[in-house]
Image (cartoon, grey):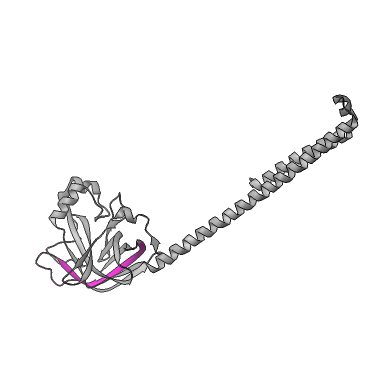
Amino acid sequence: MQKPPKIKFLMILLIVSGIVLIGTLLSLVYARQLEEAFGGNSGTIGIRIAVLIVTFAAFLSSTVFSFLVYNHNRTVSKINDDTNKRGELFRNLQFTSTNYSIIEFMDRMLIYTESSRYVDKFIKNRDGSFHMFESSINENDVFNHPDKYQYISVKIPFKVVEGKQISKITFNRLKYERDNVNYEFIPPAEHEETRAYLLYNEYTKRNNIIVNLVVKKDSNFFDPKSINVFSKIKISLNITSLLSVTVKGTSELYFINPEQIEGDGTNTYRINSSNFVIKGMPFIDENFDDAN
């Protein structure tokens, strides 16, 4: 076990002091021999020894004093650092506890075919930051063979039930359930999250999120020509307020499936109930500036 620097220093100081002290005592015992060796007299040797003792005492006292001052400054510095860290932590907790946001999904969820204009842009830029891929899909194959896949948009109205105005919403996981079969969607490999579009409808006076999904054409997840029956949707998402405070949570939606589809193939699902479970304490998003 390694000894602390303080103990090491004291041991070295004691060893050096002991060596000097032993040397001084030996000089006293063998004063005559030293007198003969250096051609001096007893008085000269005594004076030299006295000077040596005084010098050693001055050195020892100044060294001990310097060490005590140094050790005190280190202790005070550690106390100040700890106090500053505690103060910063308290300020962050106070800030996040008053500036987070929690949302609730409401009204109707829409599922429809994504606009070809946005699909072309997505394939051209090879940027999947606003898309989620079915878990079994290789995203590089989507960019290389886009005709093999189907592109779907999901639109859900929401309202802020607690906290500040929303700045950003991102998805970590999205899972649909139908007849005990799960369709799971994940962000692209180079992103930990998928960014959702935030839109405000002037006609309904409601906020909406839109996230785009990529599935294989032979998948039975969504057929625009028929009614697609789902029992539940589970969303793992992150909600960031206007002041960059983020809350991680999971939202589950339960809804009534449509009895008919719209003329453009849109499936409309009336949301019966929804709940939001927080997965951790609010925190300040350090990547907020980069994300925007």
Q: In this view, does 201 lie above or below 214?
A: below
Inspect this view and state whether residue 200 appears: yes
Q: Position of 11 compared to 256: left or right?
A: right
**Which quadrant holds the C terminus?**
bottom left
Find the magenta span and give its range.
245-270
Residue 267, given in percent of the width and then of the height, sits at 16, 67
Q: Residue at x 20, y 72 (%)?
A: 205
Find out whether residue 253 is within the magenta segment: yes
Most distant residue in the bottom direction: 272
The chief SS type of the magenta part is strand
Q: Is residue 69 above or below residue 106?
A: above
Q: Residue at x 32, y 52 (%)?
A: 290
Q: Which residue is drawn at 41% across and 65% down?
A: 95
Front-lying residue, 218 or 290: 290
Inspect this view and state whether residue 30 appears: no
Residue 260, given in percent of the width and then of the height, sits at 13, 71
Q: In this view, does 269 lie above or below 153?
A: below
Most distant residue in the left direction: 263
In terms of image quadrants, where is residue 211? bottom left
Q: Position of 90 compared to 124: left or right?
A: right
Front-lying residue, 1 or 52: 52
In terms of image quadrants, where is residue 179? bottom left
In terms of image quadrants, where is residue 62? top right
Count the marks: how many?
0
Residue 36, given in percent of the width and then of the height, sits at 89, 25
Q: Position of 281 compared to 173: left or right?
A: right
Front-lying residue, 35 or 176: 35
Front-lying residue, 59 or 18: 59
Find out whether residue 178 is within the magenta segment: no
Residue 240, given in percent of the width and then of the height, sits at 33, 62
